[in-house]
Image: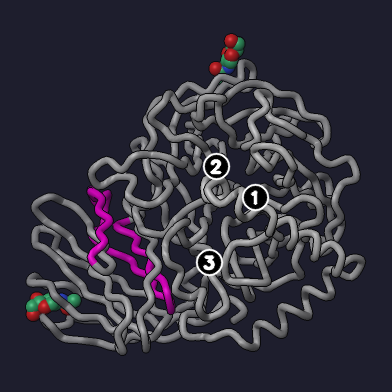
Amino acid sequence: MKASTLRKIAVAVMCCLVAVAARSVKDQPPAAGDALAAYIAGARSELEPRFRLHYHLMPPVGWMNDPNGFSYYNGQFHMFYQFYPYDSVWGPMHWGHSISSDLVHWEELPTALIPENEMCFSGSAVDDDGVLTLIYTGRETIAQEPFYREGQYLAFSDDGVNFHKYKGNPVLPAAPNGSPDFRDPKVWKHGDYWYLIVGSKTSDERGRVLLYKSKDLKEWEFLTVLGESNGDMGYMWECPDFFELDGKFVLLMSPQGLEAKGDRFKNTYQTGYIIGTFNYTTYEFIQEVDFQEIDYGHDFYATQTLEHEGERYLVAWFSMWEVPHPEADDGWAGALTIVRQLELRDNQIIMRPVEEIVQLREEFLMDGELHSDEETELPRATELIVLGDLSEDIELLLEGVDGGDAVRLRWEARSQHVVVERGGDERRASWRPARGATWRLFLDASSLELFCGEGEAVFSTRAYPLGGWRLTNRSRGPLHVQAFRLGASVPT
Ligand SMILES: *[C@@H]1O[C@H](CO)[C@@H](O)[C@H](O)[C@H]1NC(C)=O
Ligand SMILES: *[C@@H]1O[C@H](CO)[C@@H](O)[C@H](O)[C@H]1NC(C)=O
């Protein structure tokens, strides 16, 4: 979701958003879904495929941002996402929808939510006794300053495919302090109650997260401010999530407005977490560890998590606001990261690729050493396992066979930092290997995800190589590489 950009262009663009929304309302009901499906099928046949991803969720056509409604219902995982079908830039938000039985192979379903008077901004989904219930932010355009308002809305499905919006929407029409920024509800059940947190801000522009509870998802009682910036944590906290992990509570969120500090907070906006304790009687979240970034790459925002059978899974928007999206020239933009599994160790979240991702390995490509400056061409979808001697510097160059982006992965032995540099733009993080000194690297046609060790440091970066990937060894010390060609697991 994108408040600040929206605000910047608000006055100029709002009239045009109104025009688009009005047109879609007039043209589309009652068969809005059918018309949209026909549009998607037509536009999809015209996509330029060079950067289409093989095993990351992407929009069928058009624009994708935040993942939404990550849930488990009737034996399948559901993933929804912020979707604008009609252009490869942001527009009035729909909810796209995919399902999976293993969090690796995804099948596309019809668009779940179509904007009417309200744009369908981010939110979550729960299985309410057999009804898959979406809790999303409806954003309406209004005539007076600040020209928008946000509230929380419901939509229901009995089959996990077709959704209808609740007639009593919005169920939460306004923030307690009247802030128009009131979005991204995350709902979970504890005991007999549903709990909801939602991102908002104070009247003096400090990000905060509000906590509510309900018996039935429709009537909500405001409980407390779960967390709030004391002034140096940004002007808005988007996409909050709150869960127990290995005995602690984690407030995960995407703050906007953090100042870059050395190597930290170099992206337009951040995603990270605060660790603490929580008491369901007093509703008090006591913070124990300051905000830490959860992923150090260039393109990572707006996480969603889901607990299923004791595992906590996470996914994020694999892109960033206010940066170039080269695939937008090809008729689409945005993707989701591969799903990760979380663990808390020494007050740090460890993030490793979902176990089932090994099912993508289709061909064993190599197992051995590349000599210095030796080049190897790799398939567009490749997994590399690199085992190095960390007492020496390591450098691998990944670039397009026919040009395009070049990415350097480095280990700086003296400073004990991992560096991912894309076209001169570096992201750095210190890494203390917990056990193994391996890197696990997932390459796709326009992306790279680097998991260091067991996931103590993770970098998610989009990159746009032309003609597929080429790997060059720039290391001095010995380094062992295993490579697998990966299969496709998402619709193209
Ligand atoms: C939560 O707070 C209540 C009221 O102060 C207290 O009785 C209870 O022991 C606390 N629970 C935990 C798990 O700390
Ligand atoms: C890179 O080249 C160096 C020097 O030839 C060698 O020691 C090392 O093992 C090579 N690395 C890989 C990835 O094989």
Callouts 1 and 2 close, C-beta under 8 Å: yes
Residue 20 visible in rendering: yes
- Residue of label 3: 335
Q: As shown in the figure, which amino acid type bears the numbered disc 3?
A: Ala
Q: Nearer the viewer, residue 160 or 235?
A: 235
Q: Is residue 145 left or right of residue 376?
A: right
The overriding secondary structure of the stretch rendered in magenta is strand
Q: As shown in the figure, which amino acid type bears the numbered disc 1?
A: Ser
Callouts 3 and 1 close, C-beta under 8 Å: no
Q: Is residue 24 left or right of residue 286?
A: right
Corner quadrant of residue 387: bottom left
Q: Nearer the viewer, residue 155 or 348?
A: 155
- Residue of label 1: 122
Residue 457, how many percent across, how many down?
32, 52
Report the span colored magenta. 424-453
Query: Which element is circle 2 on?
Result: strand
| Marked residue nearer the N-terminal end (3 or 1) | 1
Relative to 15, is 348 above or below?
A: above
Residue 441, how many percent across, how many down?
34, 68
Residue 396, magenta (yes or no)? no
- Residue 445, numbered circle: none
- Residue of label 2: 238
